[in-house]
Amino acid sequence: RKEVEQDPGPFNVPEGATVAFNCTYSNSASQSFFWYRQDCRKEPKLLMSVYSSGNEDGRFTAQLNRASQYISLLIRDSKLSDSATYLCVVQQTGANNLFFGTGTRLTVIP
Amino acid sequence: DAGITQSPRHKVTETGTPVTLRCHQTENHRYMYWYRQDPGHGLRLIHYSYGVKDTDKGEVSDGYSVSRSKTEDFLLTLESATSSQTSVYFCAISERPTDTQYFGPGTRLTVL
């Protein structure tokens, strides 16, 4: 069983739409959670950390449900520039315990 | 952007040849990591370093070795490249193991 599972998509949405991605993780002892964004043929970049109380950064909202072991990312008012692959990342204790999902591909259509 | 460079950015090599990839950072971060990214898999950790000359294995370390003789450089070596090692390789850095990791631009390696 994979440590982190995501729906690979693709999600094709029109500009201005709201889109949500979910991710599940298998280890209940996981400590930290992140969403990274990866553009085509580029490196992953941190989009936002995910806190237990939920957090928002502009049009992006991240939520964590520890009981169900899932993480979500909501993007409101989608822009063309949001087109990318979104990686769910879970960190356990130690330096070698960062686990990546395979990513969810989003395409925002004019 | 974090000061991380990788070289080469692209490489094509033949099966059985040795290959060394270099990661260089200007952030003076203690931790450095090598990942590979393949279709259908998330990024997977190959090796990491927690200081000069201090390294440890990750999830997919077979066939790879690493060295870190200076804080700023972390080398990944494929002693005898195989086609299964065709991948995109990313280096990452962090100051502490629980900190956010910042990634280099990647090296696209093709083993024929």
Image (cartoon, coloured by chain):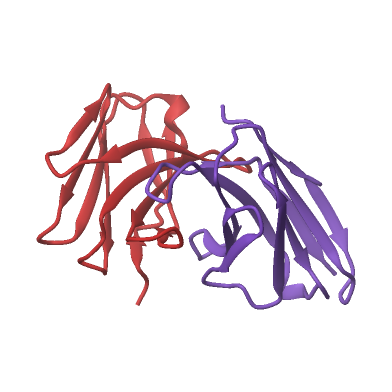
Farthest top residue?
Answer: A58
Residue A82 visible in rendering: yes
**Quadrant assignment for the N terminus of chain A:** bottom left
Residue B111 x/y as whole percent:
81, 67
Residue at (43, 46) in percent of width and height:
B96
The count of marks equals: 0
Q: Residue at x 20, y 56 (%)?
A: A70
Chain that the image shows in red? A
Which quarter of the image is occupied by the C terminus of chain A? top left
Q: Is residue B38 visible?
A: no
Q: Which percent across, then down, holds residue A106? A: 42, 42
| Drawn side of residue B43 relative to residue A98, left or right | right
The residue sitting at 56% across, 67% down in the picture is B56
A100 sits left or right of A40 in the view: left
Q: Colour of chain B?
A: purple
Q: Position of residue B108 (x, y in %)?
A: 73, 52
Q: Is residue A27 above or below residue B9?
A: below
- Which residue is located at x 28 percent, y 24 percent? A77
Residue A19 at x, y percent in the picture: 27, 38
In-image side of B24 versus A20 (left or right): right
User: Which picture quadrant has residue A50?
Assistant: top left
Residue A55 to residue A71: above or below: above
Looking at the image, which is closer to me, A39 or A55? A55
In-front residue for pair A98/A25: A98
